[in-house]
Image (cartoon, grey):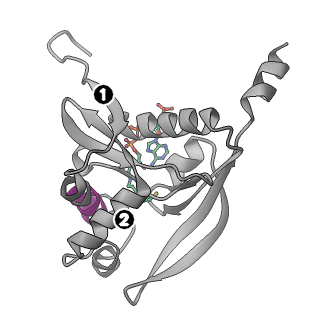
Amino acid sequence: MSASQPVPHLIVRRWRVGEEEALWRLKYQTIHSINRADYSAAQCAAWAPDDLDPALWRQRIAGMDPFVVELDGELAGFADLQADGYIDHFFCAATRQGCGVGRALMQHIHALAQSRSMTRLFSQVSLTARPFFEHVGFEVVCEQQLCVRGITLANFSMQKWLQPAGDAAEHQE
Ligand SMILES: CC(C)(COP(=O)(O)OP(=O)(O)OC[C@H]1O[C@@H](n2cnc3c(N)ncnc32)[C@H](O)[C@@H]1OP(=O)(O)O)[C@@H](O)C(=O)NCCC(=O)NCCS
């Protein structure tokens, strides 16, 4: 990168109350543009509908308690890690694809998992995100056909086994 192109300032932090609508917009735009490459317009509309109940989404976000990536002060992605190792959401903004946002989210998930002594991460991964998840060490458990608002959507159940922190240290001795 040349001196005239400063390195983007990236931070990962917990979401804040009041950001629910921005997170929905990010997810909506990513599904309707990036995931649209692998899913039909009807499937994208079922997955991210125009008439989603904002109160339900606020509840979902509060329950999920995600973390976000800020790139130069703007929301550029978000994801979460549940107590059992489940990753419910994992989205990078449509305008910030290929900028390292997914890597930052995944590194954060792995750091959290290690600090919580988790042994397994798992998620329901889109056709679009599958190669990225494979790239970071996840394996496909099975392909699934989900019924969302009356429309069938394919995705993959994926998982990654983690080496406990103690084991990694032992193997270095
Ligand atoms: C998949 C997704 C998260 C990747 O995020 P991103 O910010 O573009 O990825 P990054 O720029 O951080 O790339 C990180 C690494 O993954 C690799 N990568 C990114 N996309 C990839 C792909 N489609 N296939 C293989 N590798 C990929 C990059 O080459 C990079 O590798 P490196 O760390 O070895 O250099 C993003 O494209 C996305 O938001 N997709 C739609 C989200 C989605 O479908 N979510 C549904 C639930 S899973």
Point out the tag, 2 or 1, that comes first from the N-terminus: 1
Q: Which residue is at a point 63% across and 34% down the rendered structure image?
A: 114
Q: Regarding mark 2 in the picture, which secondary structure is present there?
A: helix
How many angstroms separate mark 2 from mark 1 (CA)? 25 Å
Magenta stretch contains residue 31: yes
Could you tell whether 169 is left or right of 70 in the image? right
**How far across and how far down the image is residue 93, in percent?**
27, 48
Q: In screen coordinates, is 157 left or right of 92?
A: right
**Residue 162: image location, x then y, percent:** 70, 40
Label 1, residues with CA under 10 Å away: few <14, some 14-19, many ≥20: some
Task: Write down the region rendered in magenta.
Answer: 25-33
Quadrant where the N terminus sits is: top left
Res. 60 mark: 2
- Along the horizontal axis of the image, is 119 left or right of 55? right
Q: Which mark is residue 10?
A: 1
Residue type at mark 2? Arg
- Could you say which quadrant of the image residue 77 lies in? top left
Task: From the viewer's side, name the closer residue of 94 and 60.
Answer: 60
Ligand 1 is located in which of the four quadrants?
Answer: top left
Taking the spot 54% from the left edge, 79% from the top edge, the residue there is 145
Q: Quadrant of residue 64?
A: bottom left
Chief SS of the magenta region: helix
